[in-house]
Amino acid sequence: MRVEAKILLWLGLFFGIMCAVYWTWSMENAGGVMMFFGTGLCLLPGSYYYWWSRRMGPRAEDDPNATQESGAGYVDAFPGSSIFPFTLGMGAFCIVLAMVFGSWMLIPGLALVIWAALGGIAEGRRGGTR
Amino acid sequence: MTTTAHDIQAEAHDHGHSHAEHHGPRGILNWLTTTDHKIIGLSYTITSVIMLVIGGALAEVIRGQLANPDGHLVTMAQYNQLFTMHGSIMIYLFAGPFAFGALANIIVPIQIGAPDMAFPRLNALSYWLYLTGAITMLLGFFVTGGAANFGWVGYAPLSDAIYSPGAGADLWIGGLMLTGFSAIFTGVNICATVFYLRAPGMTLFRMPIFTWNLLVVSILILLAFPVLTAGLIMLYSDRHLGTHIYTVVGGGSPVLWQHIFWFWGHPEVYILALPFFGMVTEIIPVFSKKPVFGYKGMVFATLTIAALSLGVWAHHMFTTGVVLLPFFSIMSLLIAVPTGIKIFNWIGSMWRGQIWFSAAMLFSIGFVVTFLIGGLTGIYLASPPLDFFTHDTYFIVAHFHSVVMALVLGGMAGLYYWGPKITGYMLNERIGKVQFWLLFIGTQVFTIPQYILGLQGMPRRMAIYPNDPQWQDLNTWSSVGAIMIGISTLLFVINIVVSWKKHPAGDNPWDGHTLEWFTTSPPPHHNFFRLPQIRSERPTWDHNHPDAKALAHGKDAH
């Protein structure tokens, strides 16, 4: 976990320096603001991972001498299949088409999105299909 | 030469989850409800190759129009739609999704020994948003006024409601929003997969370069794509909700759109390119029978490209006169250094190797050569005085077509290399080699006349040039190149039909290095029955060649 954190932190540091140089030199705000938030987008998860890496020991995937047995055990529940990504996608499709063809498209769009949200949450609680 | 994973005793690997045959819905319902990264990746691959064919067909019409100084193949208005939609389809709907959605989706989890993506349902949602985004954008051809016609960059104020009325432009914006969210979700997914689902012993610095590049691409996606989506929402709001963010008349700034667009657009160039860099970095060592030369150098070059790519966007805006020329010129020139390291390492990987000139290897070498041409002309363009001279001429068109045609070559290399793993059957090598030579020579015949035309002053995005008939010969050559590229793409489709379920590939047809060659072809549900011990960046090769002498990085056997 520590290497992952360091990559993000070094990227953030570089973006930070680049942002400072650019903003003070050019006095142009659009790019300066975007670089500033880009810096934050690296430092925020980077420092979170670093904080965690100090609390947890190296995982089996961080250990160069790990055996496959050391990773045995429960990884996670992976859903075998689910209809809700499709319904959510079609809902988003209708909502975007509503921007062009008229707001009546919002009705099927929002219905699909709400159905997908409720169904997806229920499926997540059950642990998904195998 | 090849040994399959299953006749050798391997370590037991239990993900705590049943590896039994997956019983889910069948047929169309299986496709609609799947969360298996391999099926989603295959859907991405098929959809994006269809987009390549559609975008390519538009390109052939464009080249047909330009073969004659006073062409009448299409009207001027149709021509504007053609080049806009050609660029949009190729960049947003083919190159990007093919790079980080298609092969990446299939290969990245397998290369790190993961059972699936970290968020399988989100992965499926990414695909549906991509597909619906593509349909939305293409719907533009069927509405009154036709598709978007302001260039794939959608510059304000040309893209506002006064200069570009009609539903085509709105469908372009909506389609881009959907594909933008699709990309963001894929980025989140790949980051989480690489951070959390690696197999034991697969440390970050043992990951295959392809997976490394996809991790870096995902970070870049998360930095760049939200900016584009925000910019598009503001553009829509300018068009329909009466705001004046990009219009001078209400106190807005048209250049703001260019800043936002290129702040996404230049990292996007690397989001497109890095996955293909990764593909050829996988292929060249395998077919040279050597470990990759300079593994860590490759990783740091990728990270450096990503770091610099956030600070170069305004080299697309040198001629606006309101950007800081020295800063962007220096940063753009600096990117040549890590890119040069990569080209050096590709050559180093081939150096004194036993090179097997398979179709995949030929495509990879073609990629390196073509990308070198595109990259070197990019260095010229990083210099403002040269850029002022060539901006908006065919020199620019030629530069980025060298780059993206290199990506097509790299993508073909990836399809020939991983196709047997994905389908379980080999592609025909002979057709592949003919396809390579047509595509490679066609690319150069297509782009090199355009460089000369650009230096002679031919502007881009013009439908006719009746006052400059001397440009016709070079344009005709360029059109001949485009036809060769078209035929080579047709050959690929023919190859799929001809070699459909002919020659079973076996688990490891190329004596591969990385974990995807350890499992079956195609891989089972949740990818692995067992995994080898991972002690280097090429665990499958180590497993199949237990007697080989251990080599330090970058040293040869002497």
Image (cartoon, coloured by chain):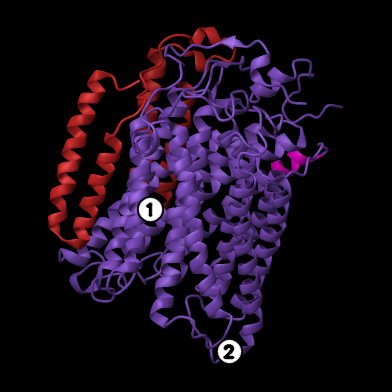
Chain colours: A red, B purple
At which x and y percent is residue B551? 76, 23
Which one is in front, B76 or B47? B47
- The answer, for residue B8, to whether it is visible in the render is yes
At which x and y percent is residue A102? 15, 61
At which x and y percent is residue B131? 37, 49
Residue at label 2? B468
Q: Are marks 2 and 1 in contact (CB under 8 Å)?
A: no
- The answer, for residue B215, to whether it is visible in the render is no
| Residue density around tag 2, few if under 14, some if 14–19, many if 20 or more, within 10 Å | few
Q: Are labels 2 and 1 assigned to the same chain? A: no
- Horizontal placement of A112 versus B48: left or right? left
Q: Main secondary structure of the magenta part?
A: helix
The residue at 53%/15% (across/down) is: B200
The reply to whether the magenta stretch includes residue B77 is no
Circle 1 SS class? helix
Circle 2 SS class? loop
| Magenta-highlighted residues | B344-351
